[in-house]
Image (cartoon, coloured by chain):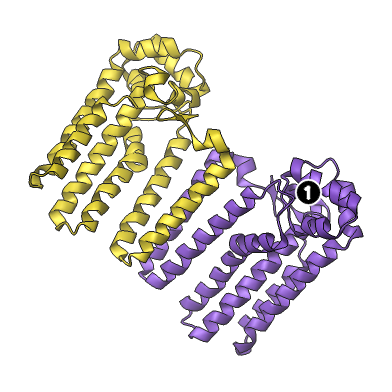
Chain colours: A purple, B yellow
Amino acid sequence: TLRRGKPTANARWGNAASVLVGDFLLSRAFQLVVSLGDLRLLEILSDATRTIAEGEVMQLSNCKNPDISEDTYLKTIEYKTAKLFETAAQTGGIAGNAPEHLETSLSSYGRHLGKAFQLIDDLLDYKGSSDELGKNIGDDLAEGKPTLPLIYTLQNGSRDDQQLIRSAIRQGGLENIKEITAALNRCGALDYTFEKARLATEKAIQSLEGLKASIYKDSLVKLAEASLERCY
Amino acid sequence: TLRRGKPTANARWGNAASVLVGDFLLSRAFQLVVSLGDLRLLEILSDATRTIAEGEVMQLSNCKNPDISEDTYLKTIEYKTAKLFETAAQTGGIAGNAPEHLETSLSSYGRHLGKAFQLIDDLLDYKGSSDELGKNIGDDLAEGKPTLPLIYTLQNGSRDDQQLIRSAIRQGGLENIKEITAALNRCGALDYTFEKARLATEKAIQSLEGLKASIYKDSLVKLAEASLERCY
């Protein structure tokens, strides 16, 4: 119902309108890209939308599944989020006539930034207040979405905590959100997730090594740093 | 809940799965089209998806609106349905290396066929039984969707019938489906709609004049004829 502190389109105009207007925006965007007449760009963008859609389906099919592995989770966020950021950064490079090695640097930057962004997003679902975050706390848990903090606790928590989380994922809902947040903190799942995000951010910044110094490069670096500190 | 006599994907797997898998199929299809490397084909297909999405939004924004004109209705079905059939026929011609005048013939065939198809679809919502039709009777009325049979009666029915239909469109629901069907029959709205479909079918078949005789041409003609007689 909330995104970045504002009511979502879905909450405000309903499901049908949001989906159909979303379809319109996507198809209009493709029409604009086609008008550029660049087949390579079209290939990259159509691969990306296919991958993102596949990631969303992967995520949906693992909803309420407590047996998902960390690898499957990481593959899902690579598909549904990292690919979006990767493509945005890469096509920016293409639009600016970047040589191949810089295009690769930008792809890599976007991919790692997107991974960090999604890890932080999944972490924030168990941290902070709804006010700060601008979205609803526990949304993932409510849907039974097995994100990294939960998956880590299923591998490393006490037997009781594992049981608590298995049944929360299976059933969805927020009945035990307090106990679950405590369990995640207890076994270091939130620290583990943050550390993974920090490493991804580091890799994102390292990917930019080949770019010469400029205010644009500085901005990309700051954007990556900010992704670790964001509240929403 | 029913399409062509079978449960819809939405009824069977829910809204999220249907929408996301639909997104996947659309993006996968675009990926395949991009791989053909034909920019003109991409232009036609991206224009078509944009137009279809716009038609769906137009339809949604006129839901529960009894003041929609026949022209707006016809524009909506041209966008949301006729464009789909037009593009299918036209791109078939392109794939078969048809010369320009035949490509135009095929576009025109598809456009008129699609128009006829949608008119019959809107007519069938007030005719036949759920068994025959393979979809639910009165679906449009239930959503307050102002289709041609209703619009015609709003222009040509008795004052009482106009009142009945205005409030049915405004409120949605199937409470008065029997009285409404009777009103549509009384003022000839179903005959009027069928006649429009028949004329569109005739135009579709006329569009094929430039094609030399073949079993393929025969099939296109039979398809157009069958669109008038279909039960679902």
Q: Which residue is rendered at x = 23% and y = 57% of the image?
A: B94
On screen, residue A155 versus residue B181, left or right, reads right
**x and y, in percent, of residue B104 in the image:** 18, 51
When the figure is inspected, residue B203 is found, relative to residue A137, above or below; the finding is: above
Residue B67 falls in which quadrant of the image? top left
On screen, residue A18 versus residue B78, left or right, reads right
Q: Which residue is mark 1?
A: A138
When the figure is inspected, residue B42 is found, relative to residue A90, above or below; the finding is: above
**x and y, in percent, of residue B31 in the image:** 42, 61
Residue B13 falls in which quadrant of the image? top right
| Closer to the camera in the image, A218 or A67 | A67
In the structure shown, which secondary structural element does the residue marked by tag 1 occupy? Answer: loop
Q: Which residue is rendered at x = 60% and y = 88% of the image?
A: A210
Specify few, some or many for label 1: CA neighbours under 10 Å numbering under 14, 14-19, or 20 or more. Answer: many
| Closer to the camera in the image, B138 or B60 | B138
Is residue A116 in view from this perspective?
Answer: yes
Is residue A31 in view from this perspective?
Answer: no
Q: Which residue is rendered at x = 89% and y = 54% of the image?
A: A183
Q: Chain of mark 1?
A: A
Residue B193 falls in which quadrant of the image? top left
**x and y, in percent, of residue B21 in the image:** 52, 48
Q: Quadrant of the C terminus of chain A?
A: bottom right
* Amino acid type at image mark 1: Gly
| Closer to the camera in the image, B139 or B211 | B211
On screen, residue A142 versus residue B222, left or right, reads right
Q: Quadrant of the N terminus of chain A?
A: top right
